[in-house]
Amino acid sequence: MTTTDMPAPGAIGQILKAYVGDLPAIDFTRPAGEPALASPDSVSWRVFKNPVSLFIGGTTAVLLELAEPRVRSGVWDHTSFRTDPLPRMARTGLAAMVTVYGARSVAERMIAGVGRMHGQVSGVTPAGHAYRASDPELLDWVQATASFGFLRAYHTFVRPPGAGRPRPLLC
């Protein structure tokens, strides 16, 4: 699969352009000569190439992320997730794939674009608590729930991530 195989020059293409500008075609099956952020022998590569761990882990991560009221309010108030969750999840999934498998320079540009977008998101929960999508506490929550979801799914439905290998870190 490549980024040019992704549906829609429309919405998804516009979102990607907002993240990174003109994104070169990325063929995840044939990485370019530039290394990715995570190495090919990393836990991230093993977990992300398994569709079961991606689907179940991603679903788990989303449910846990939304349990945090400030994250939930940010998602509800500033994205299409409430009314059209599947394209929103596909965009997030593509961003994760670019982060793991894309060339380092492309991944870093996308991450910076996501950071800029998060910098524009703020509001107040129904309970009156202020939030900012760039709040380190909320970013840590989202990262922790994603790590937990993907690693737990891989461990449960595929095999323990470190089976037969030295004990790895997350990357």
Image: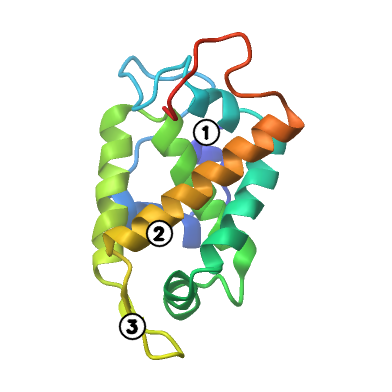
The residue indicated by pointer 3 is: 123
The residue indicated by pointer 2 is: 14
Kindly identify the residue that appears in the image at 47 percent across and 71 percent down. Answer: 75
- Label at residue 2: 1
Foreground pick, 90 / 47: 47
Foreground pick, 165 / 83: 165
In the rendered image, is residue 86 in sight?
yes
Kindly identify the residue that appears in the image at 50 percent across and 42 percent down. Answer: 147
Q: Quadrant of residue 155?
A: top right
Kindly identify the residue that appears in the image at 59 percent across and 76 percent down. Answer: 82
Of badges 3 and 2, the one in the foreground is 3
Q: Are marks 1 and 3 in contact (CB under 8 Å)?
A: no
Snapshot colouring: rainbow
How far is disc 3 from disc 2 in space, using C-alphas? 24 Å
Q: Earlier in the sequence, mark 3 or mark 2?
A: 2
Q: Quadrant of residue 38?
A: top left
- Find numbered disc 1 in the image and state the secondary structure of the residue it sits on: loop
Q: Position of residue 146 (x, y in %)?
A: 51, 48
Kindly identify the residue that appears in the image at 58 percent across and 29 percent down. Answer: 47
- Find numbered disc 2 in the image and state the secondary structure of the residue it sits on: helix
Of badges 1 and 3, the one in the foreground is 3
- Quadrant in the picture for the C terminus: top left
Q: Quadrant of residue 88?
A: bottom right
As drawn, is 1 to the left or to the right of 69?
right
- Determine crowd level at label 2: few under 14, some 14-19, many 20+ residues with C-alpha closer than 10 A: few
Q: Earlier in the sequence, mark 1 or mark 2?
A: 1
How far is disc 1 from disc 3 in space, using C-alphas? 36 Å
Q: Residue 68, relative to residue 6: is it above or below?
A: below
Q: Tell me the amino acid under the disc marked 3.
A: Gly
Q: Earlier in the sequence, mark 1 or mark 3?
A: 1
